[in-house]
Amino acid sequence: MDQIKIGKFIAERRKAVELTQMQLAEKLNITDRAVSKWETGKSMPDSSLMLALCDILRITVNDLLCGKVVEMENFNKEMENNLLEAVKEKEESDKRLLFLEITVGLVLLIPLAVSALIVSLTELEEWLQVLLVLTSLAPLLIATPFMIRIEQKAGYYRCKVCGHLHVPRYESVFFAMHFGRTRYMRCPKCGKMSWQKKTLRKD
């Protein structure tokens, strides 16, 4: 989606209904700064605000996402394009999140590897060895729940039994046995336990 185009369209429609940025913001219970960011293409309206915004601007959500008033004969085509674009953007966002998870994990493993090397190559007292390993392990342990949250939210898991794609609950991912990004979990559709593989595409 073209945020600049959508932003200009929001500004155009706001002026058409004779509202200032402040007045529009007040109607939506947000700041005028947020409206300014929309209109300059720096951000998009939150999905929870879109229906109210479109109602105020007298447009459809499809118009908003297209950055123009869509004629009825082009409505279905434009809606399909918007849906495809939204799916593509989610896939790209999920890829970035999973890359971030890997990067953070690798960065946090470095101190642990270094401390293990120091312990194996030097003759430190036993309590110092334990302290060194625990100190280097602590950041990884602290970050692990956040990395699991990323893995839970990004993409989907595919049930090996029925093929159902789903986003599991955090607890299911946290406590599941796993090999890489394949986890042994219960499918919410068929109720069977299986090794479910992570996928970014919902097709």
Image (cartoon, grey):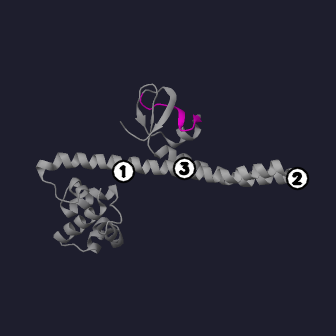
* Cα gap from disc 1 to disc 2, whole angstroms: 53 Å
Residue located 24% across and 65% down the image:
10
Q: Residue at x 32, y 66 (%)?
A: 41
Q: Is residue 175 left or right of residue 189?
A: right
- Mark 1 belongs to which amino acid? Glu
Q: Which residue is mark 2?
A: 125
SS assignment at label 1: helix
Q: At 18% across and 72% down in the image, what residue appears?
A: 18
Report the residue that reaches farthest toward the front.
121
Closer to the chain start, of discs 1 and 3, is 1
Q: Which residue is mark 3?
A: 101
| Residue 64 percent across, percent down from the top left | 24, 58
Q: Give the image location of residue 202, x and y in percent.
A: 37, 38
Residue 193 is labelled as none
- Other residues around mark 1 within 10 Å, as few (<14) / some (14–19) / many (≥20): few
Q: Position of residue 87 (x, y in %)?
A: 34, 46
Instruction: Pinpoint residue 162: horizontal percent, then vertical percent.
Output: 42, 26
Counting labels gives 3
Q: Please determine whether, in this image, residue 162 is positioned above or below residue 109.
A: above
